[in-house]
Amino acid sequence: MSALDGKVAFVTGGAGSIGLAAARALSDAGASVMITDLEQAALDSALEQLPAGRSAAAVADVTSSEQVAAAVAATLERFGRLDVVFANAGIFGVAAPVAEYPEDVFERVLAVNVLGPFHVAKHTVRHLPRGGSLIITSSVMGLIADANVCAYATSKHALVGLMRTLTKELSASGVRVNTIHPGPVDNDFQHAVEVNVTGAPAPQASAVFDGFIPLGRHASAAEIGAVVAFLAGDGAGFVTGATIAVDGGISS
């Protein structure tokens, strides 16, 4: 038997790099997976990379409580249970100092990155059984910070508070809650951030960020997905309330 045989996972941002990699890792461990994202076409493409019969998709904007609730209901209707939740959808915003940061962008980043995981937790935790796992994607910027990333860093720090609150609320019922904190990942999201932050073309910007990473390289999405699958399983049965850095040593 695989580690997650018979289990069901719910993944937001599931058509993106990290979300899809996590969905693959959870599927490889035996779980059935419901992925959500903003666009049906992207979800259809993602589903082609997941096992038929054990995978489904639902369009949902995590800033909408009603849409998240509907996606959770669709998961329960399709698979009959819920064991693992990966609250992963997120955006960056722009690079700008606090005094010049656009207020509408700041509000949008917090809506997606903080209100979104709150909605996911609100509508899933009542369905998680003893041994269930809720994993929230924060960032290395949820452990440290830097200039010109106030919206992103604020939102990712806020998720640690949400996680720690949920840990205290759910531990008695045997549900574990953790945040993961990826550093730079070799994907389109990260490369766009690097260009935004440095103003350099993508290859040069990526090289600049490699210089910040003690391991000297970006992570692969699969490496992040593997950590998610570990936290979902019984091998992490005594891991809760933890901030798991997957950042190549940046926060050390």
Image: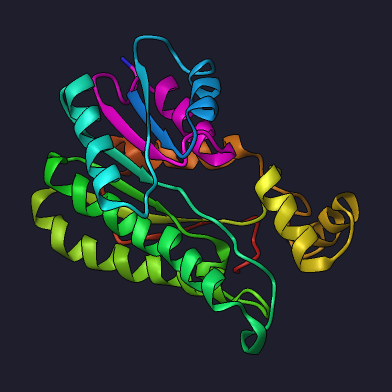
Q: Which residues are magenta?
A: 2-31
Q: Residue furthest left?
A: 172
* Quarter the N terminus occupies: top left
Can residue 45 be seen by looking at this rendering? yes
Left or right, 185 with reference to 75: right
Which residue is rendered at x = 40% and y = 35% of the image?
36
Left or right, 8 with reference to 242: left
Front residue of 140/12: it is: 12
Front residue of 32/46: it is: 46
Left or right, 148 with reference to 39: right
* Quarter the C terminus occupies: bottom right
Which residue is rendered at x = 76% and y = 50% of the image?
217
Front residue of 245/185: it is: 185
Q: Is residue 1 magenta?
A: no
Which residue is rendered at x = 65% and y = 77% of the image?
146
Q: Is residue 6 magenta?
A: yes
> Height in image: 199 above or below 69?
below
> Height in image: 215 above or below 169?
above
> Height in image: 77 above or below 247?
above
> Height in image: 61 above or below 182?
above
